[in-house]
Amino acid sequence: MPVIPINYYIFLSLALFTIGIVGVLTRRNAIIIFMCIELMLNAVNVLLVAFSKMHHVAAFATDRATTVGTEAQLFVFFIMVVAAAEVTVGLAIIVMLYRNIHSVDINFLNRLKH
Amino acid sequence: MHINEILFWFLTALALFSAMMVVFSKNPVHSVLWLIMVFMAITGHYIIMNAQFLAIVNMIVYAGAIMVLFLFVIMFMNLNAESEPQKSKWMKFAAVLSGGSLMLILIAALKDNDGFISSMRGEGSIGLIKNLGKVLFTEYVVPFEISSILFLSAMVGAVVLAKKESSTIVS
């Protein structure tokens, strides 16, 4: 029976999350920053699914008909739904930004106040 | 080594390498393509955790719809590697340093776990569509319907934001 420790998933998720943070901090292109935010969101989703699975495996040892852990996977589903809506509005804002200042460089965002 | 562990390490390496290429590639189009690779790897992780519904949704919604939207916007703006703004070396160094120290602290705080994920046969039917659909349409039907209102408002908001001024439309 193959066993993967939950620690591996925690470290994978943390590494992906950190790469997302580094991307947000190093890049100046607004679209790349937005993509790095998506990356962080997905890192959290992976961790949530891993925890739901861990919880289910622990409960399955005593009760073979358990559905423990379903809520976490539904929560991930709702996160994906909200992320889809968020991407739509965010890209609309970036398109509006590009139309106003003809660039997606976030250092020029202070021009928006004029 | 069991096939699941080999797959786990392969997908982890693929996800981390692709995520780094998202951050470090100069061309925004390449970043989008690498991000699609990250989502493919995460979909593989969902499959080896037997969360099949989420794997399909991740594939269709993220790698399919959202990334195409990003690609469309990037090509619409005609961005390329030459016009890409860069931060100074010191800013990049400070960002990597702070991100690395954050990861170090989080790992130090979370490393003491003894939970595990096994994949026995016959187990793990919670991730299948049958179970998730049953729960979604009975217990969680109200949040499900509310999310449709969220989509409607997001659609209206996107149209209002991306619409040109009314005077320019007339002219």
Image (cartoon, coloured by chain):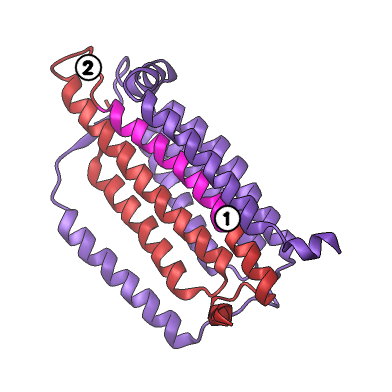
Chain colours: A red, B purple
Asked if the stretch drawn in magenta spans residue A85, the answer is: yes
In this view, B108 is above or below A5? below
Where is mark 1, residue-wise?
A: B34
> What's the CA distance linking mark 1 and mark 2?
38 Å
Q: Are marks 1 and 2 on the same chain?
A: no
The residue that appears at 20% across and 20% down in the rendered structure is: A60
* Marks 1,2: beta carbons within 8 A: no
In this view, B165 is above or below B53? below
Q: Quadrant of residue A37?
A: bottom left
Left/right placement of residue A97 relative to residue A3 reads: right
- Helix, strand or loop status at disc 2: loop
Give the total number of marks visible in the rendering.
2
The residue that appears at 23% across and 33% down in the rendered structure is: A54
Q: Quadrant of residue A64?
A: top left
Horizontal and vertical percent position of residue A70 = 30, 26
Amino acid at the residue labelled 1: Trp
The residue range painted magenta reads: A69-90
Does residue B168 appear anywhere in the picture? yes
Q: Chain of mark 1?
A: B
Q: Chain of mark 2?
A: A
Where is mark 2, residue-wise?
A: A66
Furthest-top residue in this view: A65
**Which quarter of the rendering shows the N terminus of chain A?**
top left
Amino acid at the residue labelled 2: Thr
Horizontal and vertical percent position of residue A19 = 41, 63
Does residue A2 appear anywhere in the picture? no
- Front-most of A6 and A87? A87
Label 1 neighbour load within 10 Å: few <14, some 14-19, many 20+:
many
The residue that appears at 38% across and 74% down in the rendered structure is: B96
- Helix, strand or loop status at disc 1: helix
**Which quarter of the rendering shows the C terminus of chain A?**
bottom right
